[in-house]
């Protein structure tokens, strides 16, 4: 991940939850034409589940760190 991407994610993490959701929705709308209806439905389902149970969510920086560690271990 580039330093610019990391900075964007860090800034996003500092936003209130509702503003994070708005950013997510804008990004999703931007890429909707690249997704199948099934993929869109799955993203919507996951977003609704996250909104209904925010206590089950993990901070993005933890998820990214875990993915990077897993990716490096697989190389």
Image: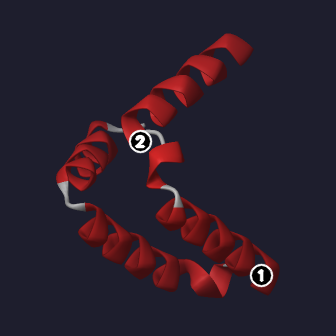
Q: Is residue 40 left or right of residue 7?
A: right
> How far from the left and from the top, in percent, is residue 17?
29, 62
Q: Residue at x 57, y 71 (%)?
A: 48
Say above or below: 14 vs 18.
above
Say above or below: 67 vs 43.
above
Say above or below: 35 vs 5.
below
Q: Residue at x 26, y 55 (%)?
A: 12
Q: Is residue 21 left or right of residue 8?
A: right
> How far from the left and from the top, in percent, is residue 38?
81, 79
In terms of image quadrants, where is residue 73?
top right
Position of the N terminus, as image quadrant, is: top left
Check contact, mark 1 vs mark 2: CB within 8 A.
no
Q: Any mark on residue 36, and which? A: 1
Q: Is residue 1 left or right of residue 71?
A: left
**First reached walking from the N terminus: tag 1 or tag 2:** 1
> How far from the left and from the top, in percent, is residue 41?
72, 80
Using the image as rendered, state which of residue 48 and residue 64 is in the foreground: 48
- How many numbered discs? 2
Position of the C terminus, as image quadrant, is: top right
Label 1 secondary element: loop
What's the CA distance linking mark 1 and mark 2?
25 Å
* Circle nearer the viewer, 1 or 2: 2
Q: Any mark on residue 54, and which? A: none
Direction right: furthest residue: 38
| Tag 2 residue | 60
User: Could you tell me if residue 22 is visible in this image?
Assistant: yes
Using the image as rendered, state which of residue 59 and residue 30 is in the foreground: 59
User: Could you tell me if residue 75 is visible in this image?
Assistant: no
């Amino acid at each position: 991940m580039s330093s610019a991407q990391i900075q964007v994610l860090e800034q996003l993490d500092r936003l209130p939850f509702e503003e994070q959701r708005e950013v997510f929705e804008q990004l999703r709308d931007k890429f909707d034409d690249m997704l199948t209806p099934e993929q869109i439905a799955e993203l919507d389902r996951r977003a609704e589940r996250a909104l209904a149970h925010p206590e089950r969510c993990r901070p993005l920086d933890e998820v990214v760190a875990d993915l990077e560690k897993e990716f490096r271990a697989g190389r």
